[in-house]
Amino acid sequence: MTNAPVDDLDTTLRAVGDIVAGIRDDQWQAATPCSLWSVRDVTNHLALGNKLFAGLLAGKPGYPLDPDYADALGDDPAGSYRRHATDIVTAFRRPGALEQVIEAPVGAIPGIAAVQLRTVEDLVHGWDLATATSQRVDYPDDIVERALAFTRDQLASMEASEDGPFAPPQPHPDDAPPIDRLVALLGRRPLG
């Protein structure tokens, strides 16, 4: 029996892992669509997020309590990203993980919401990395459509705030590819 939300995350992490592996040595300090973060910062943010959630699912406290949450990439960013990606997928595949309530930075959430949050996070920040390093994103449209539906539901339930975690949605054509609609919803300007 397959586990669709975890399968979506696994596929996403593999695609983003390919993007990270395609980053050249001279691109790690390049600017990204996340204006305050370089390519390395975004990659580290993703690796740390995956490390954090794998730990939370195992009952370990997360940052800022743990001094290991600073640099999750070391001297091998692509290898480290993939290692943390494998760890989180393994953690979410454990029996009961999707029903488990974890204390995440955003508050107490069930594992099913956490796996979907991680998928959205990696899809969007993977797009950021690909955009910053002139790479192509290759995400399955059906996964992005599910992430888009989840994100719309989550945003609809959030209180409007000027200092929220996302920039205001950006305009995009209704028939834009799913990834362009997702990144536009979360405040980025799609290139297409």
Image (cartoon, helix red, strand yellow):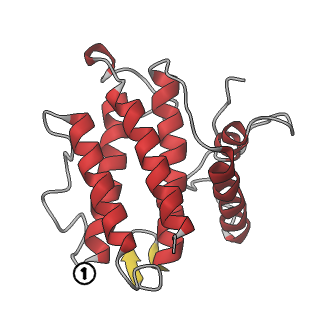
| Residue toward you, 46 or 188 | 46
Q: Residue at x 46, y 79 (%)?
A: 98
| x and y percentages locating residue 15 in the rendered image | 46, 40
Q: Residue at x 34, y 39 (%)?
A: 43
| x and y percentages locating residue 55 in the rendered image | 25, 70
- Placement of the C terminus among the 4 image quadrants: top right
Q: Up-down: is 16 above or below 148?
A: above
| x and y percentages locating residue 179 in the rendered image | 66, 40
Please identify the residue farthest to the front as the structure is shown. Answer: 1
Q: Residue at x 25, y 81 (%)?
A: 59
| x and y percentages locating residue 30 in the rendered image | 37, 20
Residue 21 image-quadrant placement: top left
**Taking 37 as reference, is 29 left or right?**
left
Q: Residues within 10 Å of mark 1 (few under 14, many from 20)?
A: few
Q: SS class of the residue under badge 1?
A: loop
Q: Amino acid at mark 1?
A: Gly
Q: Up-down: is 180 above or below 60?
A: above
Residue 138 image-quadrant placement: top right
**Taking 52 as reference, is 136 left or right?**
right
Residue 90 image-quadrant placement: bottom left
Q: Up-down: is 182 above or below 151?
A: above
**Taking 121 as reference, is 79 left or right?**
left
Q: Up-down: is 32 above or below 185?
A: above
**Which residue in the structure is indicated by mark 1?**
59
Q: Residue at x 23, y 64 (%)?
A: 64
The total number of labels drawn is 1
